[in-house]
């Protein structure tokens, strides 16, 4: 498959952004390709389209499956695995947020709780103890807010995002 210039630019940029977000560039490019194409693709076609090593594609596909961002589908008459992703950008965002929460936020909250429950906590000065408590409070509040946002219907979530600073104005009115 030959990519058109806009598709190529999108995929290359998504790969660059993936690197900045802590995701392997090829992983991000494969996801961008599957998102843009909007149809299932076999690994060999992904390899050829992106011009990357087959082993890199294979590892990247496994990573995307571990993140629940792609699924394997089968095409009648074709024995190869084909890979696809959601075309719903909001659903993709929710998946990434949920996965990052489970991989990054939840372990951090657990460690902060363990620190506060440690019998050695009293060896830390009062300010350090307070900072740990504040960090835990912030992380728990952000985690709870994130969970609530993920449960919202897409239309409701989009309306909230479009409100932007108007939510702040509303909160000042409620005081």
Image: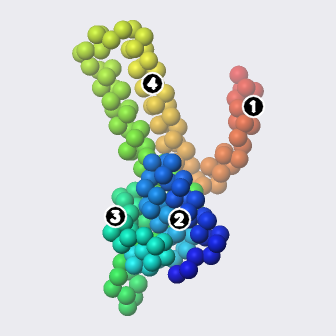
Residue located at (36% from left, 66% from top): 56
**In-image side of 126 versus 91 (left or right):** left
Q: Residues within 10 Å of mark 1 (few under 14, many from 20)?
A: few
Q: Residues within 10 Å of mark 3 (few under 14, many from 20)?
A: few
Image coordinates for residue 125, horizontal then vertical, percent: 36, 8
- Rendered view: 124 above or below 149: above
Residue where numbered disc 3 is placed: 59
- From the viewer's side, name the closer residue of 91 and 53: 53
First-in-chain label (3 vs 2) = 2
Residue in the image at 31% along x and 22% along y = 115
Q: Is residue 58 at least partly visible in the picture? A: no
Q: Which mark sits nearer the N-terminus, 3 or 4?
A: 3
Q: Is residue 147 visible?
A: yes
The spot of residue 5 in percent (x, y) is 64, 72
What residue sits right under mark 1 in the picture?
169
Position of the C terminus by quadrant: top right
Q: Which residue is mark 4?
A: 135
Q: Is residue 91 above or below residue 47?
A: above
The mark lying in front, picked from 3 and 4, is 3
- Sequence-first disc among 1 and 2: 2
Q: Earlier in the sequence, mark 4 or mark 1?
A: 4
Q: Secondary structure at mark 2?
A: helix
Which of label 1 and label 3 is nearer to you?
3
Which x, y percent locates residue 168? 70, 32
Q: Which residue is mark 2?
A: 32
The residue sitting at 44% across, 62% down in the picture is 26
Q: Which residue is farthest left? A: 119
Relative to 29, residue 136 above or below: above
Q: Which label sits on residue 158?
A: none
Distance of label 1 from label 2 (alpha carbons): 37 Å
Relative height, residue 66 to residue 57 (above, below): above
């Amino acid at each position: 498959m030959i990519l058109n210039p806009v598709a190529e630019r999108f995929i290359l940029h998504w790969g660059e952004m993936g690197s900045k977000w802590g995701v392997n560039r090829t992983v991000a490019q494969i996801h961008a390709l599957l998102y843009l194409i909007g149809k299932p693709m076999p690994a060999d076609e992904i390899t050829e389209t992106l011009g990357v090593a087959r082993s890199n594609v294979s590892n990247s596909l496994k990573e995307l499956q571990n993140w629940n961002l792609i699924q394997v589908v089968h095409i009648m008459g074709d024995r190869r695995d084909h890979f696809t992703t959601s075309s719903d950008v909001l659903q993709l965002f929710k998946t990434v947020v949920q996965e990052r929460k489970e991989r990054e936020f939840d372990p951090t909250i657990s460690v902060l709780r363990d620190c506060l429950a440690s019998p050695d906590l009293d060896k830390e000065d009062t300010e350090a103890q307070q900072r740990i408590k504040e960090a835990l409070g912030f992380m728990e509040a952000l985690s709870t807010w994130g969970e609530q946002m993920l449960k919202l219907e897409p239309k409701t979530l989009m309306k909230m995002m479009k409100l932007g600073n108007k939510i702040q104005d509303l909160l000042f009115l409620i005081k």
